[in-house]
Image (cartoon, rainbow, N blue to C red):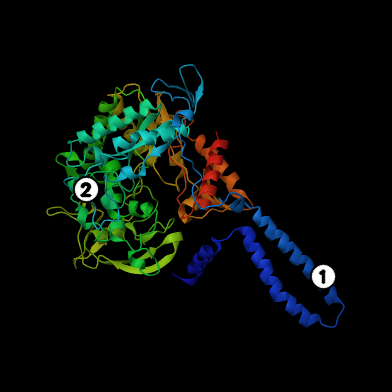
Amino acid sequence: MPWFTHVPHQVFRFTAKFYAEELVAMLLGTSMVIWLPLLEYLLRGTGIFSWLFVGSIGSLGCIVLFEMAVVRNPRFMLKPKHDCPNILEPTDYKKFGAPRQVERDVIIQGTQFRDSKGRRVHLRGINVGGMSKIPYGTSTNEPTVPYGEGVTFVGRPFPIAEADVHLARLRAWGLTFLRMIVTWEALEPRRPGEYDREYIDYIVQIVKKCREYGISVVIDPHQDAWCRWTGGDGAPRWTLEKLGLNPDALSEAGVAMLHQANLADDEDEDPKRFYPHMVWPTNNFMYPAATMWAIFFAGEDYAPKTKIGDENAGAYLRRHYYGAVSALAEALKDEPNVLGFETMNEPNMGWIGRDLGLDKYDSSQPLGYLASPWESMQLANGNSVTVAKYGEAYRYLGHYALNEHHTKVFLPGYRDPWYDNGVWDYDANGKMRLLKKRYFDLKTEEDFQARYMRPFWKGVTEAVRAKIPDAIIFMGPALDMEKPRLHVASADDAPSDSRLVWAPHWYDGLTFQFCVYRTWAAMRVSEEGMSLALGPDVAEGVHEESLKRVAGSGDAVGPTLLGESGVHWCGGYAITDMALNDSMCAIENSL
């Protein structure tokens, strides 16, 4: 990395440890240390020096006062006396809590939820839970991705025996609505059309327990970066195998960054094996996840020659996704506290409509290995490619050769679907050559939402409503912060349907990515995209402004439910508490 990009990275990493007030005080103090002796030397014997001396003492006093102001900064005002959570366990949960939550008879009136008496309802709750993305009893610290006999999601988010204590605690805290995370893999883990009935029965038991505590539920078919073998979670292993991809070769070939294969704790000691947090955006842009997204949503347009049996691969995958959702809806149809289903958590565009040639890479979030789609295709086909790697806070770590053993990611008898569909071929010397740099540009005047998300939303709606006719459908928009249009609903997205909810997400981007909280810096979300805002105490106002935009983004279809928000635990509760307080205040002020 050249100095003019490397230096700003290092400056930011240093300044991120301080607040603006502290930096200014440090600058003033350093300046005084330098210019006071210099002035004494230059002005010795003149009458001016005495006045300068008095002025310097005054300046020093100002610095002292300035530092006193720092003490009144929220960083110190909100910091707990002990670096531990300020949560007390009630001795009797029955003395606490909120009114029983609404059930599926909830009324949607314009952009509001209403109960049977016409009172406005706010759905207040949390996601349950993050561990539901991986099988019970496993972790991403194991050397391989757990799979096979004995691997099950039964027990996620928690065993039935522990449900009472969790649900009583949530109800006591006033949280009466749960976004219940399930995954396609958990529902249909082994092969197409074969559902895990034990897991489905377990989810029904959890939902029944929720009703005992007056808690309502929305089912969230969750994914991140397609599946566990592509650096995320969600889809079953067999979805890769049906397209001829070998799940066990993806990490070795360098086209998926898995925690299991990158367990180094220190980016300085072992930068090549270091795994930066929040690397999902990078994995979504790498070969396997981007290929799956392109074929899942748009196989008919971009991979017409790729079929599973006699059916286009995209249509095949969507049909089985709808089937898995329908199987769970069938099991939950008699549970009135299930308000409905979300369509999918944060669906992704992959390479589609990125306005970039395949030989260019998206560097808006440089994390992990930064390969262009063309470089990623070469890696998948057994070539070794040298690419840049970035660590925490977008820090450049160096260039590294990937796939040095020339591993191909395809099962015997299969080859790259992008070769079959004419994106590339081999030259006379047997080397890969790119034929269509702009292959993944949108092929019609419609944007991604109109062309692909609307039919997908309709497919999920029909699958759920066939089992639960009055179910509310929570529409999850495609995740792309560089295309804000995809985060706003239009009337065309929901023709003649009064039981739809827009379900976007919002995070404090700087805190989320850098694990630091600053009152003087924030990411602004607007129609033009994301931009950095700087200024005294700017964060609170910018976050509130951004959330008001999010709150109004679904007005064309119905209410807006903020499906996700929050902050990382950054190694200490003090900073986490402050950042979370900022986010929650902004959410409440945007209502």
Helix, strand or loop at disc 1? helix
Which corner quadrant of the image does residue 22 belong to?
bottom right
201 and 41: which is toward the camera: 201
**Picture coordinates of residue 327, whole percent (x, y):** 24, 30
Q: CA distance from mark 1 to mark 2?
A: 75 Å
Q: Which residue is at 51% across, 23% downward?
A: 120
Helix, strand or loop at disc 2? helix
**Picture coordinates of residue 61, whole percent (x, y):** 76, 64
Q: Which residue is at 28% across, 30% downward?
A: 205
411 and 94: which is toward the camera: 94
Q: Is residue 431 in view?
A: yes
Left or right for 510, reference 192: right
Task: Please give the label number shown on residue 54.
Answer: 1
- Dot 1 or dot 2: first in sequence order is 1
Left or right for 85, reference 535: left
**Picture coordinates of residue 141, whole percent (x, y):** 30, 56
User: Looking at the picture, which amino acid does disc 1 mark?
Assistant: Val
Task: Please give the label number shown on residue 132.
Answer: none
User: Closer to the observer: label 1 or label 2?
Assistant: 1
Which corner quadrant of the image does residue 267 belong to?
bottom left
The answer to whether residue 319 is above or below residue 275 is above
The answer to whether residue 460 is above or below residue 582 is above
User: Looking at the picture, which amino acid does disc 2 mark?
Assistant: Leu
13 and 9: which is toward the camera: 13
Q: Which residue is at 33% across, 37% downward?
A: 162
Q: Are marks 1 and 2 in contact (CB under 8 Å)?
A: no
Find disc 2 in the rendering and name its residue. 240
